Image (spheres, rainbow, N blue to C red):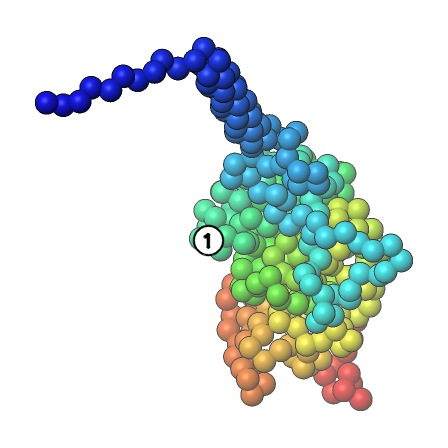
């Protein structure tokens, strides 16, 4: 037979103490739960609310680029310190067109049609060339009297017996150079500056020479206003090139000559490409594409019949006279 034990009833005081302890424990649990929930909501709010992000941190929409294509670097300039020279190997990144001038937002649909019908429709498919032709505002490079024809399929007069080339020819010659973002280009015959601007959209830097002083000054001012820091204009005879910045990855000529200037051949890099119109002013002309191999030999091919204004200056002298 099991023994029975009698358990004494707990005293009333002990019951009160136990109840008080349970109440305090429950209150503490409520406080902890509230703080945890508030913290989580605060974190979620900070993620959803742009104003709650850390100071100086950029706020961007999903999949939105931080900067537009070809925008200058966000890296601040240091007051009193000049930017690196274009050929400075220590430069962190090349100068790029800014596209902040109002002309870039004008007549966009006309440029798009020009590219679709006149350029891409004729077989030019290189994306960089098509983009450059869509971006550069051709109407900013023609006289006011020719403004309504700015995107027409033909060359236009720009004064001083010079012209701005047909858009297709500009695109064709640019495409033939096979430019990349590191290319350095020499242009002979700045004219209005349009061809230089198209090349500058693709390559690192463009050095362009114009023999007509008035055109050189106008082009320099125009390119500066439009925001092309990687285009450098010089008034002079393009026959002699620009030896201070040679050699060049590519050379483009926009005036026809009866011979190929030897200084230009010398200033073309091994592996480089040169295109220019060849032929007499009153005779048959065609674009000549030249490539230089690693030994300095040129491979030449005629790629298209054309009609350009003549190149003037030293090139017009007899070849034996210009070498003296």
Q: Residue at x 81, y 58 (%)?
A: 216
Say whether residue 173 is visible. no
Q: Residue at x 86, y 60 (%)?
A: 81
Residue 26 horizontal/vertical position (percent) = 48, 19
Q: Quadrant of residue 83?
A: bottom right
Q: Which residue is mark 1?
A: 125
Q: Circle 1 sits in a helix, a strand or a loop, which is it?
A: loop
Q: Is residue 257 left or right of residue 296?
A: right
Closer-to-camera residue (294/284): 294
Furthest residue in direction top, as rendered: 12
Closer-to-camera residue (179/238): 179
Furthest residue in direction right, as rendered: 80
Closer-to-camera residue (148/127): 127
Residue 94 horizontal/vertical position (percent) = 68, 60
Could you tell me how many numbered marks the image carries? 1
Say whether residue 175 is visible. yes
Residue 97 horizontal/vertical position (percent) = 69, 51
Residue 19 horizontal/vertical position (percent) = 46, 15
Question: Which quarter of the image is occupied by the N terminus?
Answer: top left
Furthest residue in direction left, as rendered: 1
Q: Quadrant of residue 245?
A: bottom right
Report crowding for label 1: few under 14, some 14 to 19, many 20 or more residues within 10 A (C-alpha): few
Question: Which quarter of the image is occupied by the C terminus?
Answer: bottom right
Q: Residue at x 76, y 77 (%)?
A: 243
Q: Is residue 268 left or right of residue 6?
A: right
- Residue 24 vertical placement versus 201 (above, below): above
Q: Residue at x 78, y 64 (%)?
A: 84
Q: Quadrant of residue 60?
A: top right
């Amino acid at each position: 037979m099991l023994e029975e034990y009698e358990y004494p009833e707990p005293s009333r005081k002990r019951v009160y103490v136990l109840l008080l302890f349970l109440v305090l424990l429950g209150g503490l649990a409520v406080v902890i739960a509230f703080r945890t929930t508030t913290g989580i909501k605060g974190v979620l709010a900070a993620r959803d609310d742009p104003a709650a992000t850390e100071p100086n941190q950029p706020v961007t929409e999903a999949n939105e680029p931080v900067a537009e294509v070809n925008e200058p670097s966000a890296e601040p300039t240091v007051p009193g310190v000049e930017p690196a020279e274009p050929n400075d190997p220590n430069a962190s990144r090349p100068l790029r067109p800014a596209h902040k001038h109002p002309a870039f937002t004008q007549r966009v649909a006309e440029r798009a049609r020009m590219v679709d019908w006149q350029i891409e429709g004729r077989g030019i498919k290189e994306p960089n060339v098509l983009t450059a032709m869509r971006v550069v505002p051709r109407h900013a490079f023609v006289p006011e009297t020719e403004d309504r024809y700015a995107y027409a399929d033909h060359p236009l007069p720009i004064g001083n017996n010079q012209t701005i080339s047909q858009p297709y020819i500009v695109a064709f010659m640019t495409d033939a150079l096979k430019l990349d973002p590191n290319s350095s280009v020499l242009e002979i015959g700045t004219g209005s500056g349009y061809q230089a601007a198209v090349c500058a959209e693709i390559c690192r830097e463009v050095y362009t020479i114009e023999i007509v002083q008035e055109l050189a000054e106008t082009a320099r001012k125009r390119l500066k206003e439009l925001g092309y820091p990687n285009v450098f204009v010089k008034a002079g005879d393009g026959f002699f090139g620009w030896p201070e910045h040679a050699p060049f990855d590519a050379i483009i000529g926009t005036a026809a000559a009866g011979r190929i200037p030897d200084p230009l051949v010398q200033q073309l890099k091994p592996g480089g490409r040169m295109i220019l119109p060849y032929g007499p002013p009153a005779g048959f002309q065609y674009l000549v594409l030249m490539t230089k191999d690693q030994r300095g030999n040129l491979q030449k091919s005629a790629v298209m019949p054309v009609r350009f204004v003549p190149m003037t200056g030293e090139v017009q002298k007899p070849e034996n006279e210009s070498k003296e």
